[in-house]
Image (tube, grey):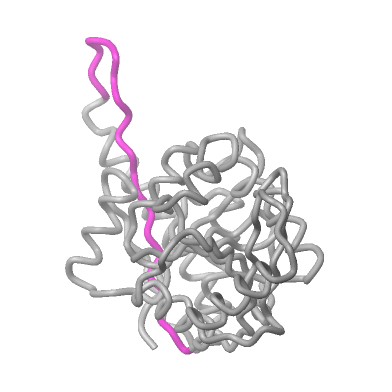
Amino acid sequence: MGTIISLTDFSQAGNNAVRYSCELANTLGADIIIIHSVVIPIMFSDIPLPGNFITDSENEAQAHMNSLVSGLALDFPGTKIEGKIAIGSTLDAVNDYLDTAGTPFMIVVGNSSKSESRIWPESILLDEVNQLKFPVIAIPEGHTWMPPAKLCFAYDSNHTYSAQEISRISNVAKTVNGELHVVSVHAEEKDAQSIELINKDICKNLGVSTEVVHVFTGSKNIDESILDSIEKFNFDWLIMVPGKHSFFEGLFHKSHTNKILHSCSIPILAIHD
């Protein structure tokens, strides 16, 4: 099956995402690698960091990691779980690991709706979503594991999806044995014939049936419509292809990002080309 990478800062939200990763890995027969980055603070004065600061921080992080992995090994005895401590940014830590370990099935991060307890500053979380060229899933704080039976792909009819993007979306759905639904939201009103054409185009591009395609028109707020569809159809995961085309240029503006990343009640999976 391969490996699932889980990122944590040892906060409640971070460790909840790690546990979610283990549940997913246990279901799929995958291995888990847990990565924690010890970030060195930027100093804006002439006062240097204590000489043993990095060593002490690394030792403390390793103690947290050992405790976390030991506890998870008892709960998931059939899953191979490893922990890794890195010095520097989260992105660098992941990329350094990937240089030697190869392509993961998925990267899992925690996502807190509370600004004072977010795992990383908002810009860092967005960097993970937008820069890591692998499927990245953000788990809402407090969200408990449940097999993802219904997956929702937020589809932009103005974008031509690459074969690799479509393949990755289909592969994720098949791997987790989830039913792939498609939600297409349009700001302008459309007549029945136009909606039918959109529906057929989606079915052709993604290889899905019309029964799982949901087209909404005349929407004044794209992100609100996506969130409403999650509640309406009881989706388990939201799949997005962020930051590459017109639909998401507005959606991933800072205010919209807050709305989606920090208001969505289900895990959000970002797929990249």
| Residue drawn at point x = 29 percent, y = 33 percent | 53
Q: Is residue 234 above or below residue 45?
A: below
Res. 107 visible in picture: no
Q: Position of residue 222 (x, y in %)?
A: 66, 49
Q: Quadrant of residue 192?
A: bottom right
- Where is residue 133 drawn, in percent x and y? 32, 62
| Quadrant housing residue 106 | bottom left
Question: Residue 211's x, y, as percent?
Answer: 71, 84
Magenta stretch holds residue 58? no
Find residue 116 and report its image quarter.
Answer: top right
Q: Main secondary structure of the magenta part?
A: loop
Residue 171 visible here: yes
**Would residue 119 appear left or right of 103 to someone viewing this image?**
right
Quadrant of the frame with the N terminus: bottom left
Identity of the residue drawn at 25% across and 50% down = 92
Tell me the magenta residue range.
29-49
Compared across the picture, whether 134 is left or right of 100 comes to right
Residue 35, above or below 45: below
Tally of numbered discs: 0
